[in-house]
């Protein structure tokens, strides 16, 4: 999934200007659907709108909530999801010391690219979780 962010970074500045703004949660959801080669329904994307900016209160990072939405979309077993989501958050927090939007923005936000680094970090951790799932780690 992290490759989808590299594709974005390879675009020219003019191409990037024509991409409509989406928040971190929406972007993660879009990237996961692209990675799984699944069409993203507009109503599913609309559900992510309120989770950007740490649910609009700079709480849990929208890239992480987008990751949770992605796991929930593609994996349906509740027991699996509980363990995989806990691992996703724990792994991210162990690597980057926080899961909170405000602290992540303080450390990684850049005016030109916004929270692109945070989304890439979350996508890389989500890739790890999906690889574990595919190997049966959570069964």
Image: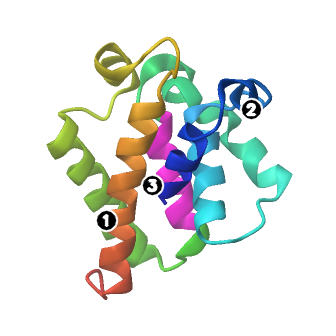
Closer-to-camera residue (3/95): 3
Q: Which residue is mark 2?
A: 15
Which residue shows up at 74% across the image and 23% down it? 17
List x then y, in percent, for residue 130: 39, 71
List x then y, in percent, for residue 7: 57, 49
Identify whether 65 is placed above or below 14: below
Closer-to-camera residue (37/75): 37
Q: Secondary structure at mark 3?
A: loop
Q: How many marks?
A: 3
Left or right side of 99 for 77: right
Alpha carbons under labels 1 and 2: distance apart: 30 Å
Contact between marks 3 and 2 (CB within 8 A): the answer is no
Which residue shows up at 45% across the image and 54% down it? 2
Q: Secondary structure at mark 1?
A: helix
Question: What main secondary structure does the magenta stretch of the protein show?
Answer: helix
Q: Earlier in the sequence, mark 3 or mark 1?
A: 3
Left or right side of 45 for 23: left
Q: Earlier in the sequence, mark 1 or mark 2?
A: 2
**Which circle marks residue 54 in the picture?**
none
List x then y, in percent, for residue 11: 64, 38
Which residue shows up at 48% across the image and 80% down it? 77
The quarter holding residue 70 reads: bottom right
Bounds of the magenta segment: 62-72
Q: Which residue is mark 1?
A: 128
Q: Secondary structure at mark 2?
A: helix
List x then y, in percent, for residue 30: 66, 51
- Colour scheme of the rendered structure: rainbow
Closer-to-camera residue (18/67): 18
Q: Which residue is mark 3?
A: 2
């Amino acid at each position: 999934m992290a490759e989808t962010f590299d594709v974005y970074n390879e675009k020219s500045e003019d191409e990037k200007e024509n991409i409509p703004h989406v928040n971190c949660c929406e972007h993660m959801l879009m990237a996961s659907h692209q990675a799984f080669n699944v069409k993203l329904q507009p109503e599913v994307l609309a559900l992510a709108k309120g989770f950007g900016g740490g649910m609009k209160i700079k709480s849990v990072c929208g890239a992480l909530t987008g990751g949770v939405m992605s796991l929930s979309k593609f994996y349906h077993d509740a027991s699996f999801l509980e363990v995989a989501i806990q691992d996703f958050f724990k792994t991210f927090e162990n690597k980057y010391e926080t899961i909170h939007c405000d602290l992540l923005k303080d450390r990684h936000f850049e005016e030109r690219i916004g929270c692109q680094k945070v989304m890439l970090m979350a996508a890389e951790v989500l890739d790890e979780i999906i690889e574990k799932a595919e190997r049966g780690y959570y069964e």
